Amino acid sequence: MPQFAYRARRRTGEVVEGVLEGPDRAAVLAQIERLGLFPVSVDATKGGAQGAARGRGSAAATLRRLWPSSWQAWRSRPRKPRLQELATFTQQLANLLQAGMPLTVALHSMTHLESRGIPADVARQLRQEVMEGRSLSDAMAKQPVVFSDLYVNMVRAGEQSGALVEVLRRMAEHFERFAQVQARFSSALVYPAFVALVGVAIMFFFMTYMLPKFLTMFEGMQVELPLMTRLVVGISHFLSGYWWLLLLVVLAVWIVFNRFQATEEGKRKIDQWKMNAPIFGRVVRLHLFATFARTLSTLLENGVPVLTALKITEQVIPNRLVKEAIARAREDVTDGKTLAQPLARSKLFPQLMVDLVKIGEETGDVPGALRNLADTYENELSIALRVMTNLIEPVLIIVMALGVGFLLLSVLSAMFAITSNIAR
């Protein structure tokens, strides 16, 4: 049986060393925890490592053949969690700490709780880092895929102020709010996109399959088809014979667009178009302003310095124009100016935000003013999403009705032409 040398701590903090036997490192870790100790390090002894290697030789070789190392690394790497998953993880950790558990015990319990989307290894690695003497925020900073700068800085502020549980609860609420906004934003676009896709698919099927079969009855008849019918027949023949050319055109447009979007100027132009687009632009602006206000207020409420909070907020915002405005505001605040002045100078933020931030600075409650702004913009966003959905649906129905009506009229006009020719 392989042997493993371990170092662990008692609940009093005393360091304990020893050697245990076990089939693998995980089994030895379980033995140490059953002894009521907190493992610091577990390493295979020289003899134990050789025995373990012999015992695992054939299995390891087979595993390497079946699962290449690069594929294993790709599968094991953590993915960026969704906001709802992060909110659940944060709320669970806050509940355990609120119940009086020490941080290491709470993190150990997190490895057994069902935190969907966040692997148990994340909590296990955090626990190991904390047991080695690092702070929770420093341990989280080593996992940037899972924990963003926003998360790490808020946890650090909670550790410094001694209000970690309260900070975790606020973060959970923060992520819950953003998850709800994203869900509303996505659901508002699902139905119109589905209707448009089905409409295009039906018209393509009719043009390439049904219409050619129907028009075979006109062949052999010495009748000049109406212009509308000839136009539809030409389009149908093109789609039937050269559909691949249409795919190439779509692919070329997609490649050109992606290359344009990859450039800094392209990103700015696209972001500017999103903000100024009719109907959709208002939704985008409200979402950006709500994100800015909610993120900055949450950071400031939890004791993050204003310059650090502005930098993190800049990273969270997806729009290039707003990012640049926040960066300029951060530079001005560094020079001693108030936050309201650069926001007003950017001509990008609404006057309501500028006025309320100015009032918050005068009363000493900028986080409260930003929180009220976030609530206001999120409520307006819900209304704007409903309006956009209510406008898009009838527009799509009208466009589809016009397309189908044009196809039917082209066929009926051909039938009328043939009937008139027979009658003569």
Image (tube, rainbow, N blue to C red):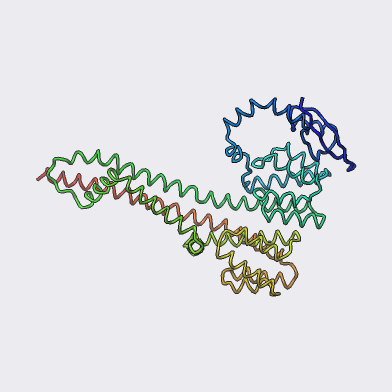
Q: Position of residue 121 (x, y in %)?
A: 70, 40
Q: Nearer the viewer, residue 189 or 92?
A: 92
* Left-right relation of 274 to 16: left
Residue drawn where x is 54% and y is 50% of the image:
186
| Image quadrant where residue 375 sits | bottom right
Q: Compared to 10, does 366 lie above or below?
A: below
Quarter occupied by residue 23:
top right
Q: Quadrant of the C terminus?
A: top left
The residue sitting at 70% across, 49% down in the picture is 142
Name above or below for residue 275 compared with residue 82: below
From the viewer's perspective, is 347 left or right of 398?
right
Which residue lies at the image location 67% right of the left edge and 40% below the top edge?
119
* Quarter of the figure with the N terminus: top right
Q: Position of residue 101 (x, y in %)?
A: 83, 43
Residue 373: x %, y % from top left: 65, 63
Q: Residue furthest left?
A: 424
